[in-house]
Image (cartoon, helix red, strand yellow):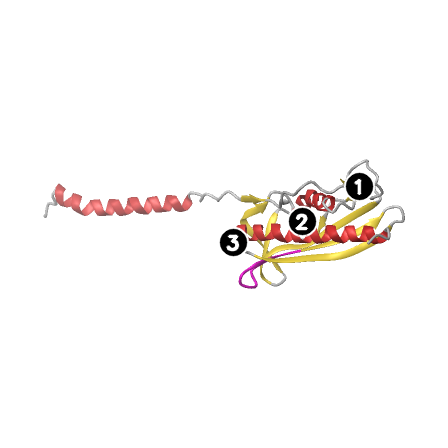
Amino acid sequence: MRVISRRTLARVCLPVVAALTLAAAGACSLLRPTATPAPAFYSLDAPREAAPPAAPAAAPTLIINPSTAAAGYDSQRIIYLREAHKLEYFANSEWVDPPARMLMPLLVAAAEHTGAFRAVVLTPSAAAGDLRLDTEIIRLHHEFLTQPSCVRFTLRAHLVENTARRVLASREFEAVVPAASENPYGGVVAANRAVQIVLENLAAFCADAVRGARGEK
């Protein structure tokens, strides 16, 4: 009968023990939940501008109703498209608030800087207004359908005369801005620029409608 020395036994067993230890460690790592990256939050902001010009004494007061959003665009999720008609969401990037809510102070600032309104007020408010502005976000998404990718922002607006309860002006505005980088941050920067373009055009449109209704040039 052959007797195995302790030294020989150690040489044989140590690799086996090491392999079993590595396997056990690997199994534990598979069972341990992986850390989920914390989401990054982004905002829509208005650029800093000079004080708005003084409005004429007879200028109307504009009431701005809370903006609404089309189905799929009424959450904090940042939307992107890789195929037409298919909305997808970035996993770890979100808006700090639904875009329709972030839009409200930006609408006020844009309207104030036209100098066409005596006051611009957000509802709910006890203030009475001559005109009312209703807006709806039709789309706000990052499109990866072309190179470079781009952000598309579409806003529908109705300017309503409160006393006569008639639509004074109505239009759909859209801006498409190329993204500087193919990632969520590049889309956020492009989205801010697209929103700025649309709101500038909307504010000018409302101011022109008011001046036209009053017979001004």
Disc 2 is placed on an element classified as loop
Query: Can you see residue 173?
Result: yes
Residue kind at label 1, given as amino acid type: Arg
Q: Which residue in the protein does label 1 denote?
A: 118
Mark 1 or 2 closer to N-term? 2
Q: Are marks 3 and 2 in contact (CB under 8 Å)?
A: no
Of all residues, the one furthest to the right in this rendering is 164
Q: Nearer the viewer, residue 17 or 213?
A: 213
Q: Nearer the viewer, residue 149 or 180?
A: 180
Mark 3 or 2 closer to N-term? 2
Instruction: Give the number of the disc on residue 74.
Output: 2
Query: Can you see residue 70?
Result: no
Mark 3 or 1 closer to N-term? 1
| C-alpha gap between disc 3 and disc 1 | 42 Å
The magenta region covers 143-153
Residue name at image x 86 percent, y 50 percent? 214
Q: Which residue in the protein does label 3 denote?
A: 183
Q: Are marks 3 and 1 in contact (CB under 8 Å)?
A: no
